[in-house]
Image (cartoon, rainbow, N blue to C red):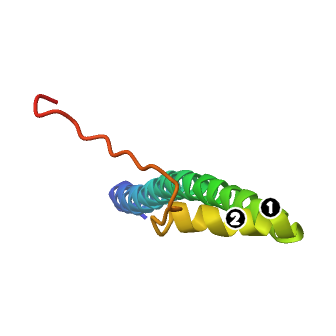
Amino acid sequence: MSLRHRSDEARENKKRHGFVRFLAGAAVLVAVVYVAYSIISDSIAIKTNTERYEQLLAETNAVKAKNEQIDGYLNNADSLDEYIKDIARDKLDFANPEDRIYYVVPSAGE
């Protein structure tokens, strides 16, 4: 083999080796971008779900407190009548005949 022929083979090997390195680098870059995107999107989803969990937990605690209050009314017959009156006043806007109801009307300047 001539010296020139060996030199051409060496250049061909370097070109192939350079192309393989380029493909490997591109693959690593794509993998890094994908992992970074996954981590960021997962952390956003975790934050959103954590906020939703906190909200649902607060709602659950409010319902449990209301249930305990209703159970207290139901366990005592006297307080059951009081509970019915409270519901009639608060939710249905009923009043006893002896009750005085005052409405606060804001003045025109407020």
Looking at this view, name the residue that lies furthest to the left: 108
Q: Quadrant of the C terminus?
A: top left
63 relative to 3, above or below: below
Question: With 57 as the anchor, is 70 left or right in this view?
Answer: right
Q: Quadrant of residue 84?
A: bottom right
**Secondary structure of the residue carrying numbered label 2:** helix
Look at 71% across and 56% down and name the residue there: 61
Which residue position holds label 2? 83
Task: Give whichever of discs 1 and 2 has the lower sequence position.
Answer: 1
Q: Is residue 85 visible?
A: yes
Looking at this view, name the residue that lies furthest to the top: 109
> What number is the disc on residue 6?
none
Three-letter amino acid code at disc 2?
Tyr
Question: With 110 as the anchor, is 4 left or right in this view?
Answer: right
> What number is the disc on residue 68?
1
Look at 77% across and 69% down and name the residue there: 80
Front-most of residues 55 and 22: 55
Three-letter amino acid code at disc 1?
Glu
Q: Quadrant of the N terminus?
A: bottom left
Front-most of residues 72 and 54: 72
**Secondary structure of the residue carrying numbered label 1:** helix
